[in-house]
Amino acid sequence: MFDWNVVQQKLLLIFPAILPIFFISVSMKHKNPVRAAVLNMILGVAGLIAASFILKALGMTLFINFFTVFSALTLGLPGVVAMVLFILS
Protein backbone atom coordinates (compact mmCIF):
# COMPACT_ATOMS: atom_id res chain seq x y z
CA MET A 1 0.00 0.00 0.00
CA PHE A 2 1.20 3.51 -0.85
CA ASP A 3 1.84 5.69 2.19
CA TRP A 4 1.51 9.43 1.49
CA ASN A 5 3.03 10.36 4.85
CA VAL A 6 6.33 8.78 3.86
CA VAL A 7 6.28 10.62 0.52
CA GLN A 8 5.58 13.93 2.28
CA GLN A 9 8.42 13.39 4.72
CA LYS A 10 10.87 12.62 1.93
CA LEU A 11 9.72 15.64 -0.11
CA LEU A 12 10.12 17.89 2.92
CA LEU A 13 13.71 16.70 3.21
CA ILE A 14 14.52 17.02 -0.51
CA PHE A 15 12.65 20.27 -1.22
CA PRO A 16 14.82 22.58 0.97
CA ALA A 17 17.98 21.04 -0.45
CA ILE A 18 17.08 21.50 -4.14
CA LEU A 19 15.49 24.95 -4.04
CA PRO A 20 18.59 26.97 -3.12
CA ILE A 21 20.47 25.37 -6.02
CA PHE A 22 17.69 26.41 -8.40
CA PHE A 23 17.56 29.89 -6.86
CA ILE A 24 21.31 30.45 -7.22
CA SER A 25 21.33 29.25 -10.83
CA VAL A 26 18.50 31.64 -11.76
CA SER A 27 20.11 34.57 -9.94
CA MET A 28 23.47 34.00 -11.64
CA LYS A 29 21.90 34.67 -15.07
CA HIS A 30 21.31 38.34 -14.18
CA LYS A 31 23.81 41.15 -14.64
CA ASN A 32 23.91 41.74 -10.88
CA PRO A 33 23.05 38.41 -9.24
CA VAL A 34 23.11 39.61 -5.62
CA ARG A 35 20.68 42.44 -6.37
CA ALA A 36 18.41 40.07 -8.27
CA ALA A 37 18.45 37.57 -5.40
CA VAL A 38 17.66 40.17 -2.75
CA LEU A 39 14.89 41.70 -4.88
CA ASN A 40 13.39 38.25 -5.42
CA MET A 41 13.44 37.59 -1.68
CA ILE A 42 11.85 40.94 -0.82
CA LEU A 43 9.11 40.52 -3.42
CA GLY A 44 8.44 36.97 -2.24
CA VAL A 45 8.02 37.94 1.41
CA ALA A 46 5.93 41.01 0.49
CA GLY A 47 3.71 38.80 -1.67
CA LEU A 48 3.40 36.27 1.14
CA ILE A 49 2.27 38.94 3.60
CA ALA A 50 -0.18 40.43 1.07
CA ALA A 51 -1.56 36.99 0.19
CA SER A 52 -2.00 36.19 3.88
CA PHE A 53 -4.04 39.38 4.46
CA ILE A 54 -6.14 38.90 1.32
CA LEU A 55 -6.89 35.26 2.09
CA LYS A 56 -7.74 36.14 5.69
CA ALA A 57 -10.26 38.69 4.39
CA LEU A 58 -11.78 35.93 2.24
CA GLY A 59 -12.06 33.60 5.22
CA MET A 60 -9.11 31.35 4.33
CA THR A 61 -5.74 31.06 6.01
CA LEU A 62 -2.20 31.03 4.71
CA PHE A 63 -0.09 30.23 7.74
CA ILE A 64 3.20 32.03 8.09
CA ASN A 65 5.63 29.33 9.16
CA PHE A 66 9.11 28.09 8.23
CA PHE A 67 7.94 26.31 5.09
CA THR A 68 5.96 29.23 3.66
CA VAL A 69 8.66 31.80 4.44
CA PHE A 70 11.36 29.54 3.01
CA SER A 71 9.30 29.03 -0.15
CA ALA A 72 8.68 32.76 -0.50
CA LEU A 73 12.36 33.56 0.02
CA THR A 74 13.53 30.88 -2.36
CA LEU A 75 10.92 30.98 -5.11
CA GLY A 76 9.71 34.56 -4.80
CA LEU A 77 6.33 35.55 -6.17
CA PRO A 78 5.84 32.36 -8.24
CA GLY A 79 6.19 30.33 -5.05
CA VAL A 80 3.62 32.48 -3.26
CA VAL A 81 1.21 32.19 -6.20
CA ALA A 82 1.65 28.40 -6.13
CA MET A 83 0.83 28.31 -2.40
CA VAL A 84 -2.27 30.47 -2.92
CA LEU A 85 -3.44 28.26 -5.80
CA PHE A 86 -2.90 25.22 -3.61
CA ILE A 87 -5.08 26.75 -0.89
CA LEU A 88 -7.79 27.78 -3.35
CA SER A 89 -8.00 24.33 -4.96
Image (tube, rainbow, N blue to C red):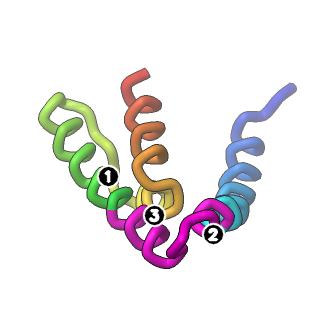
Q: Which residue lies furthest to the right in this view?
A: 1
| Camera-nearest label, 2 or 3 | 2
Relative image position of residue 31 (x, y in whole percent): 54, 71
Determine if the magenta segment contains residue 44.
Answer: no
Image coordinates of residue 7 in percent, x first then y, are 75, 42
When the figure is inspected, residue 32 is found, relative to residue 51, above or below; the finding is below
Q: How crowded is mark 3: few (under 14 residues within 10 Å), some or many (20 or more)?
A: many
Residue 71 vertical position relative to residue 21 in the rendered view, above or below: above
Going 32% across and 52% down the picture, which residue do you hit?
A: 48
Q: Which quadrant, please, contains the N terminus? A: top right
Q: Is residue 30 magenta?
A: yes
* Amino acid type for the residue under numbered disc 1: Leu
Amino acid found under the numbered disc labelled 3:
Leu
Who comes first in sequence, dot 2 or dot 1?
2
Residue 13 image position (x, y, % from top left): 71, 60
Judged from this view, the residue extending furthest toward the front is 31
Quarter of the image for residue 17 reads: bottom right
Quarter of the figure with residue 62: top left
- As shown in the figure, which amino acid type bears the numbered disc 2? Met
The magenta span reads 25-42
SS assignment for the magenta stretch, majority? helix
Q: Nearer the viewer, mark 2 or mark 1?
A: 2
Q: Which residue is drawn at 17% across and 45% down?
A: 53
Give the crowd class for mark 2: few <14, some 14-19, many >=20 residues within 10 Å.
few
Which residue is outermost to the bottom?
34
Residue matched to label 2:
28
Secondary structure category for the residue under label 3: helix
